[in-house]
């Protein structure tokens, strides 16, 4: 939209609203109150009509009844207007009411903006929504004298094709259109980009976006959110949706999110989770956040002494949850007690025909602590041993979970963001 010629041809919504509406005979019938368009199907939505106001009377005029649109007046084909009530047709949006001054997402730059003005351009016989401005100067001009409204400023007009919008009111379904999935442009963003968008959105817009994402994608983004934003997201979400989101998150991240919620909010989420996640998180919540049992990760990679290295590798390759925390592999005896801890590197590069038991280093027993060990003991044990992790075991030596340095850091520095690897 940098061409001066194109700039002369575009029409501003701020300039258009309030313009006189003239009949075929040139008589003033009212003023433009709003402009309707079918947003969601095409990259550049076509204007489908205007709302005309004269005193307390309002009427909707279909685009076919309009002879011409300019920045100074709208000319009609008809000699008179049939006044009466109106309502938007399916897929239609009133641009001044539903988009102006509301949040939009610039998918090209993964940032949230607020529409200060909208711009139209002619495309054959149609008028189409072509761009949006979000800069402060445009907003101030729009709020100032009418003669200053609608003037494009510099290079601040953003192509509408890269915009994603939200439904105008809480509780409404995500925006859709013909052959257009809700927020398809946002689902292609990386988790880190989605985080920036989610944290900048208002409560309603944030919930709508999360509802349109798959739970796995939403969970990846939620895990990156700041502590306060994550708490606000869960408290504002439908309990069933919040429960599914937590269940899709890495257990340690879900646990930290639950701990930050008021105790009275937790049961409603836990009760709606899948049984396995409910049991796992319920167990962890039973321990305080300053004990080993309260900071451990229950996702464990385990192997048996008698199986071959190749057998163990094949079985562990399907344990997708383990990919979020690369660490040793716990070797369990016939009674499911911890017999050793094998570095995952040794398992990956070892001779596939060897037994897992052969990889256990003699004289180096696994590092273990009980679930009620204080956080200070956990920290000191890791530092003194120079190990990459330790196992949390019950009184009989059965593994309950694993603690890595990142888990300790999460407990010592609440709210910090742990680096993620894609």
Image (tube, rainbow, N blue to C red):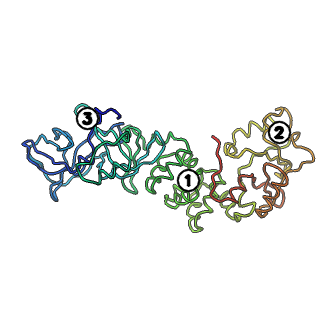
Residue 15 horizontal/vertical position (percent): 24, 47
Sequence-wise first label, 2 or 3: 3
- The numbered dot on residue 307 is 2
In primary-sequence order, the first of circles 2 and 1 is 1
The image position of residue 160, as x and y in percent, is 37, 40
| Residue beneath the point at 90% across and 48% down | 364
* In the depicted structure, whether residue 65 falls above or below residue 409: above
Q: CA distance from mark 2 to mark 3?
A: 72 Å
Q: Which residue is mark 1?
A: 244
Instruction: Give the crowd class for mark 2: few <14, some 14-19, many >=20 residues within 10 Å.
Output: some
Query: At 92% across and 45% down in the image, what residue appears?
Result: 362
For the residue pair 165 and 336, the one nearer the viewer reads as 165
Q: Name the residue at the right extreme.
A: 363
Q: Earlier in the sequence, mark 1 or mark 3?
A: 3
Residue lying at the far bottom in this picture: please name it: 264
- Local secondary structure at mark 1: helix
* CA neighbours of label 1 inside 10 A, class few (<14), some (14 to 19), many (20+): some
- List the residue tagged with mark 3: 122
Q: Which mark is residue 385?
A: none
The CA distance from mark 2 to mark 1 is: 36 Å
């Amino acid at each position: 939209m940098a061409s001066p010629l194109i700039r002369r041809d575009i029409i501003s919504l701020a300039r258009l609203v309030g313009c006189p509406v003239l009949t075929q005979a040139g008589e003033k019938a009212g003023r433009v109150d709003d402009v309707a368009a079918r947003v969601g199907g095409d990259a550049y939505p076509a204007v489908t009509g205007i709302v005309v106001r004269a005193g307390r009377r309002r009427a909707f005029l279909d685009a076919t009844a309009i002879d011409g649109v300019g920045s100074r007046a709208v000319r009609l084909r008809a000699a008179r207007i049939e006044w009466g009530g109106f309502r938007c047709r399916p897929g239609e949006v009133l641009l001044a009411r539903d988009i102006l001054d509301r949040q939009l997402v610039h998918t090209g730059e993964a940032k949230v903006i607020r529409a200060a003005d909208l711009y139209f351009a002619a495309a054959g016989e149609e008028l189409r929504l072509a761009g949006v401005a979000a800069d402060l100067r445009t907003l101030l001009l729009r709020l100032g004298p009418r003669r200053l409204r609608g003037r494009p400023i510099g290079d601040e007009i953003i192509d509408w094709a890269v915009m994603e919008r939200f439904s105008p009111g809480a509780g409404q379904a995500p925006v859709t259109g013909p052959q257009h999935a809700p927020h398809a442009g946002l689902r292609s963003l990386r988790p880190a980009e989605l985080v920036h968008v989610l944290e900048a959105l208002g409560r309603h817009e944030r919930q709508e976006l999360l509802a349109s994402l798959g739970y796995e994608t939403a969970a990846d983004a939620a895990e990156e959110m700041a502590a306060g934003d994550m708490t606000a997201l869960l408290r504002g979400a439908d309990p069933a949706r919040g429960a599914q989101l937590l269940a899709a998150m890495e257990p340690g991240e879900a646990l930290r999110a639950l701990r930050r919620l008021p105790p009275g909010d937790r049961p409603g989420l836990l009760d709606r989770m899948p049984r396995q996640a409910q049991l796992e998180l319920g167990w962890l919540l039973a321990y305080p956040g300053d004990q080993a049992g309260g900071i451990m990760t229950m996702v464990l990679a385990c192997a048996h002494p008698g199986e071959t290295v190749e057998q163990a590798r094949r079985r562990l390759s399907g344990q997708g949850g383990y990919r979020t925390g690369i660490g040793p592999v716990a070797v369990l005896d016939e009674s499911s007690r911890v017999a050793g801890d094998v570095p995952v590197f040794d398992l990956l590069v070892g001779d596939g025909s060897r037994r897992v038991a052969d990889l256990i280093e003699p004289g180096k027993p696994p590092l273990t602590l009980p679930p009620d060990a204080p956080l200070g003991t956990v920290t000191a044990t890791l530092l003194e041993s120079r190990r990459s992790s330790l196992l949390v075991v019950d009184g009989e030596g059965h593994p309950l979970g694993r603690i890595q340095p990142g888990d300790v850091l999460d407990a010592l520095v609440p709210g910090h963001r742990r680096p993620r690897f894609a």
